[in-house]
């Protein structure tokens, strides 16, 4: 019984940790793409807002929300 609980806990925690660690990678990709982006001023502002929102959510521990915002920014950048 203890073994089953331990395995279940492990399988729950490991993906969450891996998911949380991908936020900084996506933020870095956005940062690298921004200087070469050919977007309108409004779209550039929106991308920067989404990137900032993603960082804020990541710092607050909301990694799913962070990834949603960051992925929206990436889509706007064509990534």
Image (cartoon, rainbow, N blue to C red):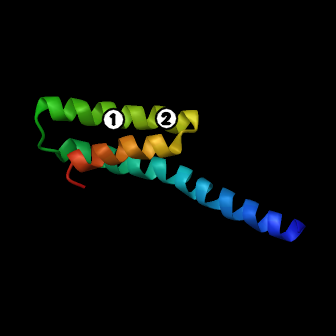
Spatial distance from mark 1 to mark 2, Cα to Cα? 10 Å
Name the residue beneath numbered marker 2: 57
Residue at the far front in the pictured view: 1
Give me the disc on residue 59: none
In this image, 75 relative to 70: left or right? Answer: left
Tell me what residue is drawn at x 24 percent, y 42 percent. Answer: 34
Please determine whether, in this image, residue 4 is positioned above or below residue 14: below
Circle 2 packing at 10 Å, graded few (<14), some (14-19), many (20+), is some
Please determine whether, in this image, residue 44 is positioned above or below residue 2: above
Residue 53 occupies quadrant? top left
Q: Earlier in the sequence, mark 1 or mark 2?
A: 1
Please determine whether, in this image, residue 46 is positioned above or below residue 27: above
Circle 1 packing at 10 Å, graded few (<14), some (14-19), many (20+), is many
Q: Percent from the top left, x then y, of residue 17?
A: 61, 54
Tell me what residue is drawn at x 25 percent, y 55 percent. Answer: 79
Give me the disc on residue 50: 1
Please determine whether, in this image, residue 3 is positioned above or below residue 45: below
Q: Nearer the viewer, residue 49 or 30?
A: 49
SS at circle 2: helix
Tell me what residue is drawn at x 75 percent, y 60 percent. Answer: 9
Tell me what residue is drawn at x 19 percent, y 34 percent. Answer: 44
Q: Percent from the top left, x then y, of residue 30?
A: 32, 46
């Amino acid at each position: 019984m203890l073994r089953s609980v331990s395995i279940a806990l492990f399988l729950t925690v490991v993906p969450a940790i891996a998911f949380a660690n991908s936020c900084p990678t996506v933020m870095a990709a956005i940062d690298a793409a921004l200087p070469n982006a050919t977007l309108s001023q409004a779209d550039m502002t929106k991308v920067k807002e989404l990137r900032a929102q993603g960082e804020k959510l990541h710092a607050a521990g909301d990694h799913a929300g962070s990834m949603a915002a960051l992925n929206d920014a990436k889509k706007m950048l064509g990534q």
